[in-house]
Amino acid sequence: MATTLIRRMMQALLVIFAMTVIVFVGVSVIGNPVDILINPDANQAERARVIAHYGLDQPLWRQYLAFLHGLLQGNFGESFVYDRPALGLILERLPATLELAIGALLIALVIGLPLGLYAGLYPNRISSRVIMSGSILGFSLPTFWVGLVLIMVFAVELGWLPSNGRGETAELLGVKWSFLTADGLKHLLLPAFNLALFKASLVLRLTRAGVQEVLPQDFIKFARAKGLRERHVIFGHVLKNLMIPVVTIIGLEFGSLIAFSVVTESIFAWPGMGKLIIDSINLLDRPVIVAYLMMMVLLFVVLNFVIDVCYTLLDPRVRLDSKA
């Protein structure tokens, strides 16, 4: 067990190192931030001073080594635009994106798991077919279009929910959160639902497929033959065997909710990391872009490791030291 954990941690470190090269080089060869940072009317001396200040006069390999040295110390560099540590800027926006992603994931699970379970247990019912047809809409409808429709219906026409911002926040552990206040929850509901629509459809279809795969198994027939109640069979045996693929999807999709919430945050003016990265891309703020991408890499690596550990908790037959 310990040997396998160490081996997987080493693999994760190699992945992170490889991504530092890919991310840094990829971002560095796109555009020239000097053209945006420096006034076109600036003289040559001023231009040279700014370029030297940000280290853009150094060869790319020297810039990468400086970046790697700072990365090992938790320093992602100074933002070209805000003249502040890039990591600090991202961490300021992280709580907003984090609570939006968690809210969307909870909504997706609340909608997807029960409906998928029902559609899998009773596949021939008309209601099940309606549910599966509805899940296709969840995959097909563009996120930006759904967001605009939600704003038009619930914010403009009905006036039930606000359409932008985080609303009133409350502090917990030194961080401001929207979900702790009634006004903040109202602001959170629309963007979270918009972000959750695709994920709910994914969980629904995965759960239905898993139920139909598990039901014909011998251990389910044996449980029923023992006279166990149907509720116990479903929740004690069917759902338990469904949780491994569901945990995989939940873990990976949670990472994607954080990484790809850019559209939703832009539509609803949600002040999270997505809006920051869009602004940074427009301004070619390299340190912020690189810091954001590296945080996403680290997030997915950690999530994959946690998912592997969760396997052993859900199914004792699955071992981290098993050979794939």
Image: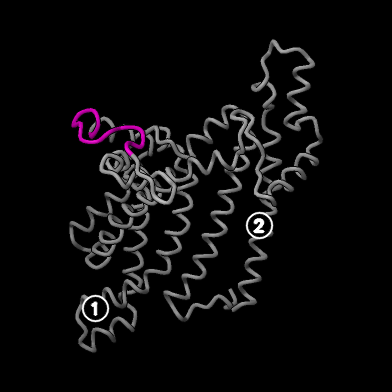
Which element carries disc 2, helix, strand or loop? helix
Return the x and y of residue 302 as percentages of the image width and height.
55, 60
Whether 285 is drawn above or below 75: the answer is: above
Pinpoint residue 183: horizontal percent, then vertical percent.
27, 39
| Residue at x 59% of width, y 29% of height | 82
Residue at 69% x, 59% y is 14
Amino acid type for the residue under numbered disc 1: His
Q: Which residues are magenta?
A: 154-168
Q: Which mark is residue 295?
A: none
Please state the horizontal and vertical placement of residue 48, each as a whole percent of the image: 78, 21
Q: CA distance from mark 2 to mark 1?
A: 43 Å
Above/below status of 291 relative to 280: below
**Amino acid type assigned to the residue bearing label 2 in the image:** Val
Is disc 2 surrounded by few (<14), some (14 to 19) or many (20+) residues within 10 Å? some
First of labels 2, 1 by sequence position: 2
Does residue 162 lie above or below 217 as drawn?
Answer: above
- In the image shown, does 310 or 96 lie closer to the viewer? 96
Dot 2 corresponds to which residue?
A: 15
Which class describes the residues within 10 Å of circle 1: few (<14), some (14-19), or many (20+)? few
Residue 232: assigned label: 1
CB under 8 Å between callouts 2 and 1?
no
Q: Main secondary structure of the magenta part?
A: loop
Is residue 74 found left or right of 165 in the rendered image?
A: right
Image quadrant where residue 266 sits: top left
Q: Quadrant of the N terminus?
A: bottom right
Q: Which residue is at the front of the view, 34 or 200?
A: 34
Indicate how the structure is coloured in the image.
one colour
Task: Inspect the magenta stretch and tell me whether residue 158 lies in it.
Answer: yes
Q: Which element type, helix, strand or loop, lies under badge 1?
A: helix
Does the magenta run of residues contain 99?
no
Query: Given the current orientation, which residue lies at the most extreme top position?
Result: 41
